[in-house]
Image (cartoon, rainbow, N blue to C red):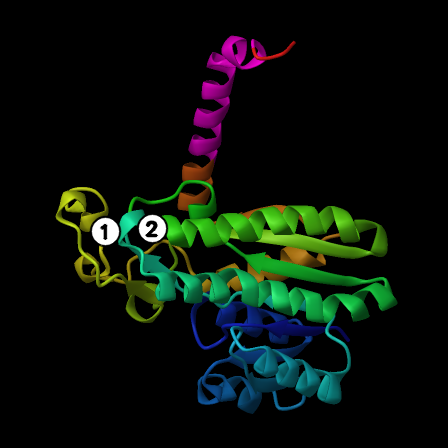
Amino acid sequence: MKTWLITGCSSGIGRGIAKAALQKGYQVVATARRLETVQDLTAAYPQRALAAALDVTKPDSIRKALQAAEERFGPVDVLVNNAGHGYRAALEEGEDNNVSELFQTNLFGPVALMKAVLPQMRRQKAGAIINVSSIAAVCAVVGSGYYAATKGALELLSDALRQEVAPLGITVMTVEPGAFRTRFFDDSLKGTAVKIKDYAETAGKNRKEHIINHHDQPGDPEKAGRVIVDAVEQPNPPQRLLLGSDASAIVCAELERRLAEAQAQKDLSVSSDF
């Protein structure tokens, strides 16, 4: 029986993945910064679910969560890096401490977890890593460049890792969700305290304080969880999995725009050769 370790299970897509994996019969280590937010999962599946406190920005927290997982279920077979948060600021308005924390949470925390599980996955010549990114990695929203940068970096690291570990029987999948009916805009979005007037009509319109979450997003987190689990079970999981009708439309349009631009500039591009 495979063991999944999933970060950010208190709500949203992380919880959806945990529930879907449990419903499929897997063992799940459901993690969150606050343990009480995931204990209902262990109550519903006492034999196959373990709640573990995990702050991905703290190495000791990562070590303790993985130790608890191994003591209860054995090695982790599937790692899902889902925990993360947003940050709204124009580039010039970015606060160093907040930007550093954002990268630590969205990028370096997942990297630390991957480095922690890979030795065992290499030994068993099997395993799967799922990194939850965002459509922002493909097309950044104005005022959300720092968040997009964390997700873009995570995706490119995932691309390199996929090639490094494929001969070892380990798969790596990146998930790019669109808008889902979660509490992301309520609980997981931070904003800069620096307000520069010249950005009022661009990044300023997307400040945290201007966002009202009507909870009418098209995406269903529980369906997302089932789709992700189903994708991991495929013989050849997708390298990138778009989630949601909006994600499919937005990303495909952006990739088509990029291709058209590259083709239009082809003569100029190749003119730099010897």
Mark 2 residue crowding within 10 angstroms, few (<14) / some (14–19) / many (20+): many
Q: Residue at x 31, y 60 (%)?
A: 95
CA separation, marks 2 and 1?
8 Å
Tag on residue 144? 2
Position in image of residue 242 (x %, y %) = 52, 47
Residue range corresponding to the magenta coloring: 252-271
Tag on residue 150? none
Q: What secondary structure predominates along the stretch shown in magenta?
A: helix
Quadrant in the rendering for residue 115: bottom right
The residue nearer to you, when weighing 135 against 22, is 135
Marks 2 and 1, the one that precedes in the sequence: 2
Q: Residue at x 59, y 46 (%)?
A: 156
Position in image of residue 239 (x %, y %) = 65, 46
Tag on residue 206? 1
Image quadrant holding the C terminus, namely top right
- Dot 2 falls on a residue whose secondary structure is loop
